[in-house]
Image (cartoon, helix red, strand yellow):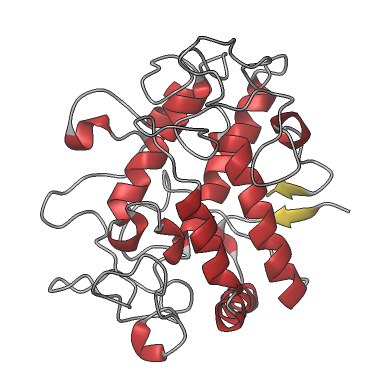
């Protein structure tokens, strides 16, 4: 039977506690840091050589759907009642609203060094030492809203702009495309700085700290953010019932994207699944 992912703002005190405790247990076992490492390995940009499966490519959405499912399966091995909630950043838009509460993810980092000092993931609690992609800090950092260069979270109209596009993705299948739902949702835009960050990308920048860069999984809000992104894919599919993941076939030899992206029926590394396998999640989970 399919289980339900809920809006984080609707979780009961017990549901919050169980979700947090399951995350902390994965961290204690060393399993959580494996997810951080995996995301770092597959964070490949346009400017690098080789296959791009997680970012700046059509498979951005199925890759993170499978990634979320792996985390959710690990959490449910700890506590079978737990599912990953989603953070609707078009609705809960302040630094004190859900999920930034002491009984869930904790709040903003302090101004001096962005260190998170509240909630169960604060370093002082002793349960959340950052071990992957560490430079000079081993504590979780955030800069909600970017104090020195403020930006706003994406709005409902920003999401609508992506959801209204009837085509999943277009050539050249990277961060430069200006049409297609995938990149409008992933959020690589034109211009420099904050004006170029749309939807998914803008949220990472708004949270700041550990959420900026390949090791963004170090902040547990990563999962709540991507659950909401995954929900948008579901909504897009419902709105455009005849639309499918593109490209259906891999780019031909000699093309700039040959061997660099995953077509609908090709294996999606590091798993033995295809984007086609991941288009329908209804037998596994649904959204409340």
Residue sitting at 57 percent across and 11 percent down? 253
Tell me if residue 19 comes above or below residue 260 in the rendering.
Answer: below
Q: Is 217 or 226 nearer to us in this picture?
A: 217
- Quadrant of the snapshot with the N terminus: bottom right
- Image location (x, y in percent) of residue 209: 28, 61
- Image location (x, y in percent) of residue 167: 56, 14
Image label count: 0
Residue sitting at 69 percent across and 53 percent down? 69
Residue sitting at 74 percent across and 25 percent down? 265
- Image location (x, y in percent) of residue 277: 78, 34
Residue sitting at 39 percent across and 67 percent down? 100
Q: Is 272 or 185 nearer to us in this picture?
A: 272
- Image location (x, y in percent) of residue 252: 59, 10
Q: Is 53 or 165 nearer to us in this picture?
A: 53
Tell me if residue 37 comes above or below residue 56 in the rendering.
Answer: below
Camera sees residue 214? yes
Question: Hey, which quadrant is residue 179 in on the image?
Answer: top left
Question: Hey, which quadrant is residue 30 in on the image?
Answer: bottom right
Q: Is 180 or 6 nearer to us in this picture?
A: 180
Question: Hey, which quadrant is residue 152 in on the image?
Answer: top left
Tell me if residue 254 comes above or below residue 205 in the rendering.
Answer: above
Seen from this angle, which residue lies furthest front?
Answer: 254
Tell me if residue 191 comes above or below residue 214 in the rendering.
Answer: above
């Amino acid at each position: 039977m399919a289980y339900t992912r809920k809006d984080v703002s609707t979780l009961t005190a017990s549901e919050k506690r169980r979700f947090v405790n399951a995350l902390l247990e994965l961290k204690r076992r060393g399993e959580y840091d494996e997810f951080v490492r995996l995301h770092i390995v597959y964070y490949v940009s346009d400017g690098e050589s080789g296959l791009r499966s997680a970012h700046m490519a059509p498979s951005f959405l199925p890759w993170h759907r499978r990634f979320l499912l792996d985390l959710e399966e690990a959490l449910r091995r700890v506590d079978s009642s737990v599912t990953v909630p989603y953070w609707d950043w078009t609705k809960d838009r302040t630094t004190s609203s859900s999920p930034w509460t002491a009984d869930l993810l904790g709040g903003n980092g302090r101004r001096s060094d962005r260190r998170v000092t509240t909630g169960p993931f604060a370093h002082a609690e002793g349960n959340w030492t950052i071990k992957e992609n560490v430079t000079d800090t081993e504590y979780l950092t955030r800069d909600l809203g970017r104090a020195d260069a403020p930006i706003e979270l994406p709005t409902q109209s920003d999401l609508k702009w992506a959801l209204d596009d009837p085509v999943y993705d277009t050539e050249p299948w990277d961060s430069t495309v200006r049409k297609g739902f995938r990149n409008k949702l992933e959020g690589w835009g034109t211009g420099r700085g904050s004006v170029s960050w749309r939807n998914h990308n803008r949220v990472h920048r708004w949270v700041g700290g550990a959420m900026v860069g390949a090791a963004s999984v170090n902040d547990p809000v990563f999962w709540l953010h991507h659950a909401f992104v995954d929900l948008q894919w579901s909504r897009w599919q419902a709105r455009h019932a005849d639309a499918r993941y593109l490209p259906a076939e891999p780019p031909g030899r000699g093309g700039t994207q040959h061997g660099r992206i995953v077509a609908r029926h090709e294996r999606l590394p590091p798993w033995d699944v295809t984007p086609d396998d991941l288009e329908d999640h209804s037998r596994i989970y649904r959204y409340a």
